[in-house]
Amino acid sequence: MRWGLSDRRSILRGGLTTVGLAFADSLFPAWAQTGTAGTKAGSELSGDHIQLRIRSSHIEVGRRSGHAILANGTMPAPLVRLKEGQNVRLSVSNELSEDTSIHWHGLILPFQMDGVPGISFPGIKPGSTFHYEFPVRQAGTYWYHSHSNMQEAMGLFGPLVIDPAGEDPVGYDREHVLLLSDWSPVHPHKQLRRLKQMGGYFNMQKQTLAGLLAGKDQSLDERIDWGRMRMDATDISDVTGSTYSYLVNGHDSDANWTGLFVPGERVRLRIINASAMTNFNLRLPELAMTVVQADGQDVVPVETDELQIAIAETYDVIVTPGAARPFAIIAEAIDRSGLCRATLAPQLGMTAPLVPLRARPLLTMKDMGMDMSGMDLASGTLDLSAPADAPSKGGHGSMKMRDKSLAPESVRMGPGVATISAAPADRIADRPTGLEQVDHRVLTYADLKALHPSHDRRSPERELEVHLTANMERYMWSFDGVKLSENPEPLAFRHNERVRVTLVNDTMMPHPIHLHGHFFELVNGAEDQQPRKHTVNVLPGGKLSFDLTADALGDWAFHCHMLLHMHSGMFRVVTVRKEGGTA
């Protein structure tokens, strides 16, 4: 990444002097510079009063350049490091010509400090400063980002690490932050317009005749069946590597962010997915990872070879490189339209090998929430543009994916709901999209167990079902068929009530769903050790449940963290009130 400098890649390739490298990396915050020995005092913003200044800039990433919005002049933003138990004041000054905001993702705080314009505060006007003040009530790996005008996609995000007040249950010798992101010179509002015009605008990996003849894609019959349903088995990601550069700590593969280690050390990697629209499959091809935290919460250590980190999730892992050689860190987009390689190395100048992209995955009927046994598509066609209550055009075996009989009363059927999953499956133990067939260990939600038992062991008092709905062809996204712009009633909870919430994904894409101001316990069979999370990825055609103790009074955002989905309407307000309606 650069601001009006000569091509960064050519600088790195030519025998760059130590002084030149230091100058180039000064454009990054200290924690994100290549060759860092790890996060340490002096590479972060800390203390009881922290200041951030938000301004516009023009940046270049590899061969791409465009408009960006930065905090303190860098992308990514500075590392904010806090201590559990302290009181902090974070002053955010807006030097833009438009409103801005900062949301402290995953933090437990008063709702007025949550940073969501129109819900928890008015936003930060141009030329003004807002002071966020709150006690720090937790420890772990988190991040912060704008919640205004899709500024997050333009670079306004950064890591936030909170050290525990007592002894850290995770033992390690060194730590590095790995902040994953996607960046495009195409403004997110323009991306959205193009997707409204054509749902698969950025998908350059559609099936071809060559793929059919080579037996790499669907068979001819399968393609005909999917064509009748107006579905595309390659529709994995809305925005792809055709416009995105994939980055680790602001560096692309050519720039090769490098973090140092000493052989034999336990290295803690604090992995954050700060992308706008990309879920990543992350692996170190020659190193096993031991997962020790999920969403900042300690878990029973579990070893794996690869994990999928959805947008807005965080995972902390321990790796132990034993040899004095470079090791690759591979963050691969789930649709395989691109990847980013970074390096762990014993000394600066080493480069780990850049692995090839793996084959692009294909969706299946399971991703549509459909059990195809006994169904016959040939006897009828599926018209997704027909009214929801229209009679089937086919015979006995025809399929009606928008049949009203499949939808609960809570879902408002209309042009924004193209499909209702006929048989959504509990996919909590399923390998996530694109990793179903790999020949090594893959983390699933079923593998996670909280290190400490839940404080609230009450059974849920009631149940709530929320459907994730869409018309992907028209690029319409919603909860229960209703967009936020249609002013749906808030999801209301009584203070401290215990509720089991089930999310049903009626679309063919995974959705990372985030609830502000709370942690919930993911129902995964771990009983009183259900993992605590603030963001959960609901696989296509699947469902999952979490138990929520509504212990945070106020108004909170609840939304898909795919930025264009949220902006298009997959967003609700959650209210938590005492008996009698007071906050």
Image (tube, helix red, strand yellow):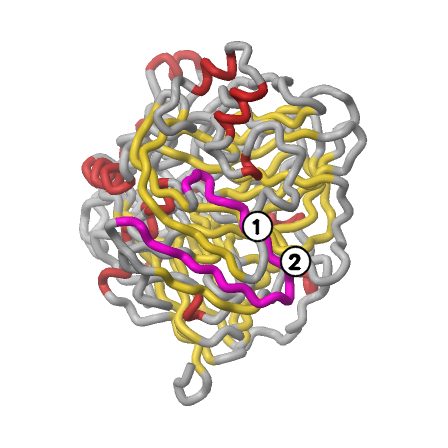
- Which residue matches tag 2? 525
Task: Identify the magenta region.
Answer: 73-96
- Secondary structure state at the residue bearing disc 2: loop
Q: Amino acid at mark 1?
A: Ile
Q: Nearer the viewer, residue 283 or 83?
A: 83
- Give the percent coordinates (x, y) of residue 443: 63, 41
Left or right side of 290 for 203: left
Cα separation between marks 2 and 1 = 9 Å
Left or right side of 370 for 273: right
- Secondary structure state at the residue bearing disc 1: loop
- Give the percent coordinates (x, y) of residue 74: 43, 39
Q: Earlier in the sequence, mark 2 or mark 1?
A: 1
Q: Is residue 354 above or below residue 543?
A: above
User: Is residue 57 inside the magenta stretch?
Assistant: no
Q: Quadrant of residue 176?
A: top right
Q: Quadrant of residue 398?
A: top left
Q: Quadrant of residue 16?
A: top right
- Give the percent coordinates (x, y) of residue 317: 67, 42
Residue at (54, 78) in percent of width and height: 496
Q: Is residue 566 above or below residue 263?
A: below
Q: Amino acid at mark 2?
A: Gly
Q: Is residue 421 visible?
A: no
Residue at (46, 76) in percent of width and height: 553
